[in-house]
Image (cartoon, rainbow, N blue to C red):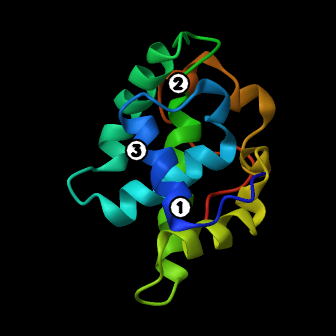
Amino acid sequence: MTTTTNEAEIERIATGFCDHSLPKEEWTHAAHFSTALWLMMKRPDVNPERDMPDMIRRYNESVGGVNSDTSGYHETITQASLRAARALIATLPAGAGVAEAFAALMGSPLGDKDWPLAHWTRERLMSVEARRAWMEPDLRPLAE
């Protein structure tokens, strides 16, 4: 978990992700969510559900990572995280900022990097199929 909750730090992380200047060690669970929230709330030109998969793949490659059947980009986790982030944003008061959204998200069960395991068995979630394409949860549906 991170204590990054201010707008400027979230923007630094998100723009660093977008322009590939964010150091690999800073691309954490919290950074994934802060970036997703920032894109959803500050970049109407970006459709995260459509655009983030390639953005993440390109970022991974830019920092020496590999997108394969065992590492790098994971479609099911990404799309589930985006759905969860959108659901959380919908609960916030009008005019809430990214930092407020991030604090609420990180204070929820989503703040735990293993949150998807409440919805998917580890075997299903870590499968090649789930990494490549969306797979419905096999334990508990995601809240919409």
User: Which residue is outermost to the left?
Assistant: 45
* Residue closest to the eye, 91 or 14: 14
Disc 1 designates what residue? 85
The image quarter containing residue 130 is top right
Disc 2 is placed on an element classified as loop
Question: Where does the image place residue 32, in percent across and percent down from the top left?
Answer: 57, 44
Residue depicted at x 78% and y 37%: 121
Q: Answer above or below: position of 57 versus 103.
A: above
* Residue closest to the eye, 63 or 132: 63
Disc 3 designates what residue? 15
Q: Answer above or below: position of 101 versus 83.
A: below
Residue at mark 3 to residue at mark 1: CA–CA distance: 18 Å
The image quarter containing residue 55 is top left
Residue depicted at x 79% and y 44%: 114
Q: Residues within 10 Å of mark 2 (few under 14, many from 20)?
A: many
Question: Where does the image place residue 45, in percent across and percent down from the top left?
Answer: 20, 53
Question: Where does the image place residue 118, in percent across and percent down from the top left?
Answer: 79, 51
Disc 1 is placed on an element classified as helix
Question: Where does the image place residue 64, in percent across and percent down from the top left?
Answer: 54, 10
Q: Residues within 10 Å of mark 1 (few under 14, many from 20)?
A: many
Residue at mark 2 to residue at mark 1: CA–CA distance: 18 Å
* Residue closest to the eye, 11 or 85: 11
Q: Answer above or below: position of 82 versus 128.
A: below
Q: Are marks 3 and 1 in contact (CB under 8 Å)?
A: no
> Three-letter amino acid code at disc 1?
Ala
Disc 2 designates what residue? 73
Task: Report the side of 124 relative to 79 (left or right).
Answer: right
Residue depicted at x 70% and y 25%: 126
